[in-house]
Amino acid sequence: MRVRDQVVKMAEVNFLCVHKKLRSMRLAPVMIKEVTRRIHLENVWQAAYTAGVLLPTPLTTSQYWHRTLNPKKLIDVGFSRLGERMTMSRAIKLYKLPTSTLTTGLRKMELRDVPAVTKLLRNYLSQFAVAPEFDNNDVEHWLVPRENVVDSYLVESQVTHEITDFFSFYTLPSSILHSQEYSILKAAYNFYYVSTSAPLLQLMNDALIIAKQKDFDVFNAVDVMENESFLKELKFGQGDGQLYYYLYNYRLSWPLKPSELGLVLL
Ligand SMILES: CC(C)(COP(=O)(O)OP(=O)(O)OC[C@H]1O[C@@H](n2cnc3c(N)ncnc32)[C@H](O)[C@@H]1OP(=O)(O)O)[C@@H](O)C(=O)NCCC(=O)NCCS
């Protein structure tokens, strides 16, 4: 991770989970202590993590936004509600997307694109106060498309064959409880992107179109990076959830706005 101009080796802690039957028995602190011990053994003394709960002391607080792709299902299961003066048919019309993408030269990322994507992403992330320092291995690990895990697309110039733009989203389904009709909510989460030639708004609109083609019900994002520039225009609605970002054993001497953060955890 880079914090302003200091690069610090950090662990990323993610996927903390305790079995439902063992909740509220203070196992989480035990697991956190153990993962901390193991990270220390690797000679790493700082870490980055996120949580939906408020703990001491967030680096920044981001808001969840949701772009409805399948209004009928989201309303049927109670994920969203029809607003005043809104009918189901109006909602379906409101969230309708074109059937094919709009950006010329858009294609799926492949393994051979790793160096070009790394270069693009490193350059883009350098503008944020706090952001990961990706190398080719990180990009290969996190961003090469994997069915039902991560989708990544890029724009290749038709003339120079240069890679100019990129976007990605990851898949995280949720269980739907107490529904006769549905058992899984298929959610896509906005991941990393870079826009240098196509407008970011258009790239993100293409991300929504692809997510819809792949039968996702909702496309989620938090307001980090430059996300605020497209959320409202692309009909994301603000959710009631917050995502708190934390650094372990690293104190920033100034408060950080979400738009100054270039970090998204899977
Ligand atoms: C998050 C989870 C592991 C917490 O376990 P739990 O059984 O509810 O809580 P425990 O009794 O073990 O521990 C409670 C302590 O853990 C802390 N805690 C809870 N969630 C935490 C989180 N995501 N990160 C760090 N600490 C957390 C609480 O603040 C509390 O500590 P405190 O009393 O010092 O404030 C559990 O609720 C879970 O598996 N949830 C589903 C998966 C999930 O949401 N994971 C987190 C993704 S960010």
Image (tube, grey):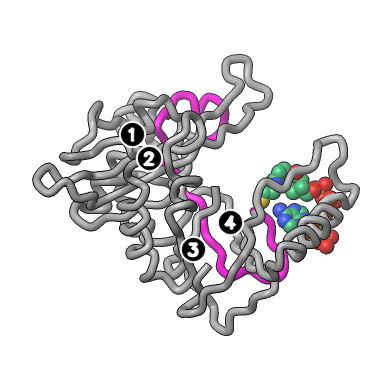
| Residue at the image position 46 percent from the left and 79 percent from the top | 5
Q: Which residue is mark 1?
A: 95
Magenta stretch contains residue 92: no
Q: Which mark is residue 111?
A: 2
State which mark lies toward you, 1 or 2.
2
Query: Is residue 99 among what the camera can see?
Result: yes
Q: Marks 3 and 1, how far apart in space?
A: 33 Å
Q: Which amino acid is tagged 3?
A: Pro
Q: Earlier in the sequence, mark 4 or mark 1?
A: 1
Ligand 1 within 8 A of label 1's CB?
no
Answer above or below: position of 87 versus 152.
above
- Residue 155 figure quarter: top left
Structural distance between the alpha carbons of marks 2 and 4: 31 Å
Residue, x 75% and y 65% (percent of image)? 40
Q: Is residue 98 above or below residue 196?
A: above
Nearer-N-terminus badge (4/3)? 3
Q: Mark 1: which secondary structure?
A: loop
Kindly report which numbered mark, 2 or 4, lies closer to the viewer in this rendering: 2
Residue 148 point in image, percent of width and height: 50, 30
Q: Which residues are magenta?
A: 52-79
The answer to whether mark 2 and mark 4 are in CB contact below 8 A is no
Foreground pick, 23 / 36: 36
Which residue has dot 3 on it?
132
Q: Residue furthest bottom?
A: 253
